[in-house]
Image (cartoon, rainbow, N blue to C red):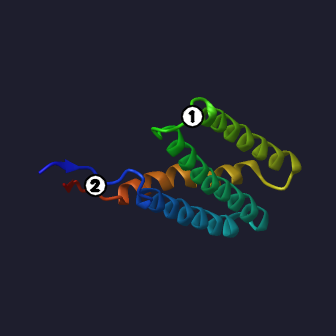
Amino acid sequence: MKKTPTDPDSDSGISRVAWSVFAIGVGFTVVGGFVGGARAVTSVGAGAAIALSNLFVLAFLVRRLISPSRPTGQWGAAVALKLLVLLAGVFLLWKSGRVDVLSLIIGYVSLPLGIVVGQIATPTPVEKES
């Protein structure tokens, strides 16, 4: 019998990572409240929210980029636009004075930490026999 890997479009991997990013972001936000007060809560929470939304947008775009039926160039431009919007949004938040940059970065760090934790918690894919 031929063995085939599990469905690559399954959302189980991204779900684990998303929950990890969310949990770490909430944890950082709570700790930020105790350490830095209300402004730190806002800043760390904004960084964590940006990280989580960036994860979902990036996952969507990567799926479209590796899709066999993708139109050429269209999704590559979308990735560049996503990066531009991310950088412009963070710049505008910073320049408005509503967030502290260091606290915002601490919240955004929930993205790489959540990816690592989510991947550690993900079991190895099981091959199905067909």
The answer to whether any part of residue 101 appears in the image is yes
Residue 37 position within the rendered picture, expressed as x and y whole percent measured from the top left:
75, 67
Q: Is residue 28 above or below residue 87?
A: below
Residue at horizontal 74 percent and vertical 42 percent from the top: 85
- Nearer to the camera, 9 or 31: 9
The answer to whether any part of residue 109 appears in the image is no
Q: Earlier in the sequence, mark 2 or mark 1?
A: 1
Residue at horizontal 30 percent and vertical 54 percent from the top: 6
Residue type pointed to by label 2: Thr
Residue 31 position within the rendered picture, expressed as x and y whole percent measured from the top left:
62, 67
Alpha-carbon neighbours of circle 1 within 10 Å: few (<14), some, or many (≥20)? few
Alpha-carbon neighbours of circle 2 within 10 Å: few (<14), some, or many (≥20)? few
Mark 2 sits on what residue? 124
Which of the 4 image quarters holds residue 127?
bottom left
Which mark identifies residue 71?
Answer: 1
In the image, taking residue 33 as reference, residue 24 lies left or right, namely left
Q: Is residue 117 above or below residue 38?
A: above
Residue 88 position within the rendered picture, expressed as x and y whole percent measured from the top left:
78, 41
Residue at horizontal 49 percent and vertical 62 percent from the top: 20
In the image, taking residue 98 as reference, residue 106 lies left or right, namely left
Residue type pointed to by label 1: Pro
- Nearer to the camera, 90 or 13: 13
Disc 1, SS? loop
Residue 92 position within the rendered picture, expressed as x and y whole percent measured from the top left:
83, 46
Residue at horizontal 56 percent and vertical 64 percent from the top: 22
Foreground mark, 2 or 1, reads: 1
- Nearer to the camera, 78 or 43: 78
Image quadrant where one finds the C terminus: bottom left
Disc 2, SS? loop
Which of the 4 image quarters holds residue 35?
bottom right
* Cα separation between marks 2 and 1: 32 Å
